[in-house]
Amino acid sequence: MKISPTDIDLEVNSVFLPSFIIILIADAFSGFHNRRLMPYFQLFTVMADILPIGTILAVTINQVIKTAHAAKDVVIEKESFRILSAHLFDIVHVLKELELGKLNESPTARKALENLETDVKKANSLLEKYKNRGRFYLLIKCRHIVKEVQDTTRDIGKSLNALCLANTEILSGISDQVTRLQNEMQRAEFATCQSQLQILDKLDQGLASQKLDNGFANDIIVDIARAVGVTVEPSEIRKELNSFKREKEEAENRKERAEVYFLGQIIELLSRADAARDYEHVKEKYMQRLRVIECHDPKSESIPPFKAFICGITKTVMVDPVSLSNGTAYSRVAIESWFGSGEKSDPITGEPLEDLSFRSNIQLRQSIEEWKELNYCMKIRSCEAKLMSEDDSSVKDALRQMQDLIIENSINKDWISIGGLTELLISILPNLHNQEVKTEVLVTLKQAIEGHPRNKDLLIENQGFCHIVPLLACESSSSNAALELIYEIVVEESGQNVDHTRELSRQCNPICFLVAILKGTEPVLAEKACEILQKLVDVDEENVIIAAKDEWYRPLVDGVIQVLELMIDLNITQGPKSTKMAILRSSVHLELEEDNTKILCGLGLIPPLLEMASADLEAKELSLSMLVKLLTCSENKRLFSAAGAVPLIVDLMCSSPFQILAKCSEILEKLSSNGDGIKFLVDANDTQLNLKSLVENMLAFLQNSRLPYTVLRPVLRSLFKICESESGLVKTAVLTAGGISLVLNLLDHSDSETREAAINLLFLFSSHEPLGVAEFLLKPRRLEAFIGLLENTNRSDVQKAAVGLLANLPKSEVILTSKLIELEGLKAIIEILESGNTEAKENALSALFRFTDPTNIEAQKIVVELGAYSLLVDFLKNGSVTAKARAAALIGDLSMRSSELVMTSSTGQWCSCFGRARANICPAHGGVCTVKGTFCLLEAKALPELVKLLHGEVHATAYEAIQTLSTLVEKESPRRGAHVLHESGVVVPILEVLNWGSESLKVEALEVLEKVFMVTEMVDRYGSTARLALVRLTGRSIHEDGHLHRKAAKVLLLIERHSRSSISFVNGVSF
């Protein structure tokens, strides 16, 4: 609040002082910032003695509160200021207690309160003094700051003590707290934190020993930056150094020579650090050195050192030269070791030394540094020629020299870039063929950019990522080096990492390579790859989907969770929500293998998706779409059901728009697929849902004529999967909910997939209740459409269902049979026998019975003419058990009419006038037989395959085989047929059936044997073998199976009757 002098209305004689005067007084105590108000402040000072003490107290409370809050925000020595702040807040409590009581108006109390005002004002001035100072400067001055805070705290404590002594009665209720507060403040002992003291000690030692080298400067500047929370970025470091320079200028203005000297030392030291260098100055220095070496041979790589540079002890160029009292110079470490061994003479001259002290020889050090810098430039110049030579050994030599240069002095990171070597390395990288050399280039680049933002920028500007990223796929050493280089650019602490990561994503996205490394066997490399990947997905949401496509799903799951959190947090703006929702939209279109879905579910994706399913419409649709993709295997379905998701899905079906109904139906279809049936249709407690109600509700949806095909399809498919697994549900659908009539209408639907889904469901329903289907199919144009489904070779499941539906319809529908033949439906069925899948073929065989009915010989002829017979024989050879059994039965239907169709004529009919040989006579039917003419199974080569079915000892196939074989033996004239069975070796297998077959199969075997043993020769051949089996059958209790007993006894008596040497085995049995 700002108040102009014209706003002030002083009523000096008023007992009550207006609040704005209190504010003015408080502002005055804050530092007298407004010069226009100075006269008024002076007036207030004069008036202090006549102001009510309550007013002064109110002003003091206001000032204490402001100071307490300000003390919490100081960036250095936070602990000391925090304690001061806490004490000030405690003082506020004491002052307010005084305000509530009757404050003592004595001069002592007034003086104590004025002293407290003054001390709090000093505290506030202390805060103002250090509020906007540089952080580096604050650290350097931290010892002094702590001492100031300590003294200020003690002073305030003393003033508080005096004020409390003058008002003991008012404060009697809180005397213990007041006493404790006074004592703590008067005895306050503040100390600089140990880590900061260590930095200051290290800095003091460096200044004392004149350690002005680059390495020490780099170390100390990193320590200081970390301690005060500043990044080691050139821009930040230069900002802090500029703050130091301003402090130095202010100290000069104050004539504080010691402070100026101290700050100058600090500035000189820190300026030597890499991060503090001014690039233009470094560049100019390089150019100066470059001009000096122009007079030297370009092939030369170094300038010999001057003799004065050589240490007399180590015989090498001096490092950190120091001068003795007699003026000779040595390396610091070497002379310290010399004196440390007890020597007291000059190492070279032998001159005894009374004074063993030494001092830094700064001039000599600078000369040596200049000499070294000249050599740096010469080596950089020679490296350029070697790198461009395209000779591997020369390139390797240049790389080694560059690495040595960087290690020796970090200024060379700048100089090799100024000399064009960094760009040159990037340009030659893709043209190198030697993997070892490539690796060394990457290592050198990493050394050049470490802690050097400018070189990182240079690498990126020259499209370095485009050359580096492909190397992630190379052999291990190059791949590892490429990873380390990328890690240095985008992960290591840097203010520009986000921009660098965006460039990495834009130039040459490495996600696929990084994911491969992440899944590798090297944990350290995998961890670094993971960090880079995380950076990439943080800067660009699209990388979340790219990573997921490469099978790294953690960011995707995290993104879904973040979407959920954003939905819950009502304070989040729409922008972040839209961004995160875009991830979910893209994830819905991912192509996921089963293993991928397991990973996603294992990472915990299902619970947040289920929570989103209760959110807004878009979130519902996206989350349900993703859940559809995840439910590919039993493990995921189990997690889904255990989360209590199924009841939620059922509820959503009944209360949501069409698109949600469609997604929920897809989920139910997935849960019931792959043979799982109703296994996962349970609640969180694994209790089965009310499936009858569910089926009825789903069928009720079909009554809605406005339901789009996008909804009809999944509803029909899920209904099919659910009902398929439980016959009781089919009965509910057919009898209770009128499922057949509802689904029949959908066969006229304009959408082909809806018609196909309907035919699948209708096939299932028709196995229980086929009535009404035939009438529907016979309506105009519907049978043609149905035959189209039979001809749909692209959808085997549709073919299977369509032909299966046909098989389920009553055979008595003769008109339907005729129409199917007329419209080539029969032809379509036979084509399914040729090219359909196993289930479709089995259903087609069942449907074929409609056309092989022995009472409809015309239909049989068409079946045979269309080539069905050979297909049936093939099924006997290679079909499934079901297919073999049905094929055998169909052949039996055809064979039943063979005898009637045999052409029997006079002998002359079979002889030509030219004496041609007599035509072959069928041994079973006694005439000329053909497949198409008489449906003869012998001519069709079916007999051997039927015999094999008996050897297989499979009840289903053996039953049909025996029935078909029985058609060869006519009861009235069994001789021909019996001999055919004998010649084919089938009688013994039939007899063996009496040992292993089921009751019904044994009866069928006895039916055939009854006709066979009407022929005496057969009794002679097989009678003795048959007796044993027949006796066992007739020996069983008649109450157990009377029919089988009597049938066996009848055959046994038949054998006895025709036997030439009859020995009765059965007595007392009559017929």
Image (cartoon, helix red, strand yellow):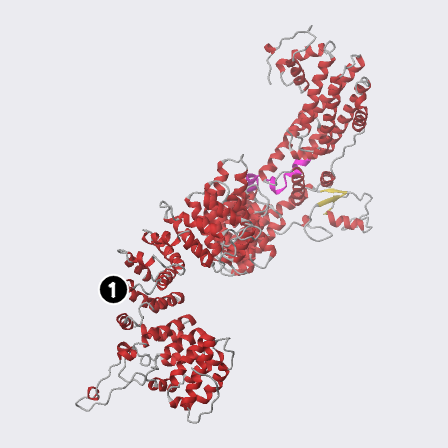
Q: Nearer the viewer, residue 444 or 986?
A: 986
Side (left or right) of 802 relative to 245: left
Side (left or right) of 148 relative to 283: right
Residue 579 pos. (x, y %): 48, 41
Q: Is residue 818 above or below residue 139?
A: below
Question: Toward which corner of the image does residue 720 lie, by quadrant?
Answer: bottom left
Side (left or right) of 935 relative to 1036: left
Residue range (magenta): 265-284
Residue to which mark 1 is pinned: 822
Magenta-drawn stretch, dominant element (helix, strand or loop): helix
Q: Is residue 516 above or below residue 333?
A: below
Name the residue: 65% across, 40% down. 226
Question: Toward which corner of the image does residue 521 lie, by quadrant?
Answer: bottom right
In reply to whether residue 275 is colored magenta, the answer given is yes
Q: Nearer the viewer, residue 963 or 340?
A: 963
Please identify the residue farthest to the bottom as the structure is shown: 1061
Res 296 seen here: no
Q: Nearer the viewer, residue 655 or 173?
A: 655
Residue 1008 pos. (x, y %): 39, 81
Name the residue: 70% across, 17% down. 58
Residue 488 pos. (x, y %): 57, 49
Res 304 seen here: yes
Mark 1 secondary-structure assignment: helix
Please identify the residue farthest to the left as the structure is shown: 913
Name the residue: 30% across, 83% down. 925
Side (left or right) of 473 relative to 782: right
